[in-house]
Image (spheres, helix red, strand yellow):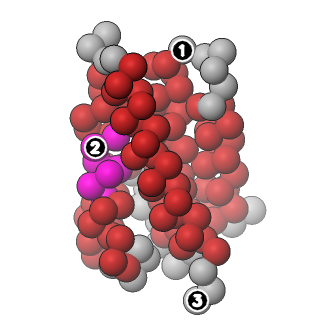
Amino acid sequence: MSKFENHKKLYLNFKGDAENEDLSLPSRAELYFLSIYHLIECCAAKYRIHINKHQKVRILLENNPYIFEKETENVWRLFQDIENKIRPKFTYGFSWTDKDFSELKEKYYILEEIGNKILTEEF
């Protein structure tokens, strides 16, 4: 399987698990984060680019703006909000609220829409 196919499979697997309401909200928050990271990786892989670490999303997207074109800054900003502002509340403590989880999902679905548009576009 190509890196593209691997990342797409991981994106969908993590998304399916994230939407499992039987899991705890902290687990689901982490799974949404992993899912959207792999969708971004999938979009990059379409152009034969590999991010390799979630901490490198911003720099890689800024250096390769043709991946998301006019949405480049929006993508890395939304991703960083999930990664650095929302996810840690769930992963490292108990400071999260239901509103935080709703915000995470809202940003996730915006990113998902952008990413899926990229995946369906022809070169």
> What is the magenta range?
76-82
Q: How many marks can you see?
A: 3
Q: Is residue 120 visible?
A: yes
Find disc 1 in the rendering and name its residue. Answer: 24
C-alpha span from label 2 to label 1: 21 Å
Q: Residue at x 61, y 56 (%)?
A: 7
Residue 103 is labelled as none
The foreground one among 37 and 71 is 71
The residue under label 3 is which amino acid type?
Phe
The foreground one among 51 and 43 is 43
Where, by quadrant of the figure, is residue 2 drawn? bottom right
C-alpha span from label 2 to label 3: 29 Å
Residue 36 % position (x, y): 49, 48
Q: Where is 65 relative to 74, above or below?
A: below
**In the image, is 23 to the left or to the right of 75?**
right
Find disc 3 in the rendering and name its residue. Answer: 123
The residue under label 2 is which amino acid type?
Asp
Residue 15 % position (x, y): 62, 40
**Secondary structure under badge 3?**
loop
Where, by quadrant of the figure, is residue 59 drawn? bottom left
Residue 20 % position (x, y): 66, 25
C-alpha span from label 3 to label 1: 40 Å
Residue 81 is labelled as 2
| First reached walking from the N terminus: tag 2 or tag 3 | 2
**Secondary structure under badge 2?**
helix
